[in-house]
Image (tube, rainbow, N blue to C red):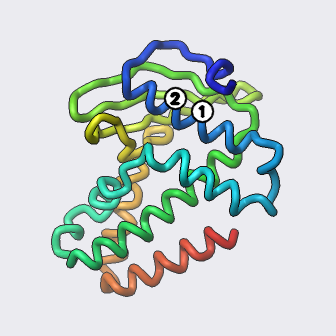
Amino acid sequence: SAALCAPSSARGGEPTDQIRQAIDRGLEIVKRPDLKGDAKRGERRALLRKELFPYFNFEEMSRRALGIHWRNRAPKERQEFLALFQELMENSYAGKIEGYNGEKIVYGKEALDPPYAEVRTKIVTPQGDEYSVNYRLLKDGDRWRVYDVVIEGVSLVNNYRSQFADLLDRYSFGDMMKKLRETVRKQSAG
């Protein structure tokens, strides 16, 4: 099983276990011979969505990505934004995991500050290059769920927050949503 070949350098607690499970499930899916290639993309993505994305807290991500602009949105606008942002995140994360090419995942230290936690991982390429991917989690009932991913020191959520803030300085919320829809449509077609 994939769990056996995932090396670990540090034994973390529950948050690390959840990240390990999520990564193992994702890799199991992208490694499956029957799901390889562009023709199988829809099927592969549907499976990733079902297996991997329950580990993500998209509502928390959306709220943080919109920042101060979340507060003055109507519930319907929040729901629309959440649905689109979730699709954007799923597509971009699925795209990254589909690019898997024999990299090794090394689990580092876990920082625990309930209800928050951070699980540090390192991706080591077959060529020996390393980069850090840290997962920020929030306790949600009896499980930990990811609300931010920090790649090489850059927070995904903060990155989107500054992009959205920039767009909302120049455009209406409706226009920003149109641009976001277009981005998601291109991603899905890509």
Say which residue appears at 50% left-offset and 65% top-offset. 87
Q: Which residue is mark 1?
A: 24
Callout 1 touching callout 2 (CB < 8 Å): yes
Q: Compared to 129, does 8 lie above or below?
A: above
Q: Is residue 154 visible?
A: no
Secondary structure under tag 2 reads helix
Q: Position of residue 164 (x, y in %)?
A: 36, 69
Amino acid found under the numbered disc labelled 1: Asp
Please indicate whether residue 20 sits to the left or right of residue 187 in the image: left
**What is the residue that sits farthest to the left in this orientation?**
72
Q: Compared to 43, does 142 lie above or below?
A: above
Amino acid found under the numbered disc labelled 2: Arg
Q: Which residue is mark 2?
A: 20
Crowding around mark 1 (Cα neighbors within 10 Å: few <14, some 14 to 19, many 20+) is some
Say which residue appears at 27% left-offset and 78% top-offset. 76
Name the foreground residue: 148 vs 57.
Answer: 57
Q: Quadrant of residue 123?
A: top right
Q: Count the marks: how many?
A: 2
In whole angstroms, how far apart are the C-alphas of marks 1 and 2?
6 Å
Q: From the image, which quarter does the C terminus lie in?
A: bottom right
Q: From the image, which quarter does the N terminus lie in?
A: top right
Say which residue appears at 68% left-offset and 43% top-offset. 29
Please indicate whether residue 152 sits to the left or right of residue 188 in the image: left
Q: Position of residue 173 (x, y in %)?
A: 31, 82
Say which residue appears at 36% left-offset and 75% top-offset. 80
Q: Position of residue 74 (x, y in %)?
A: 20, 78
Crowding around mark 2 (Cα neighbors within 10 Å: few <14, some 14 to 19, many 20+) is many
Q: Position of residue 55 (x, y in %)?
A: 44, 43
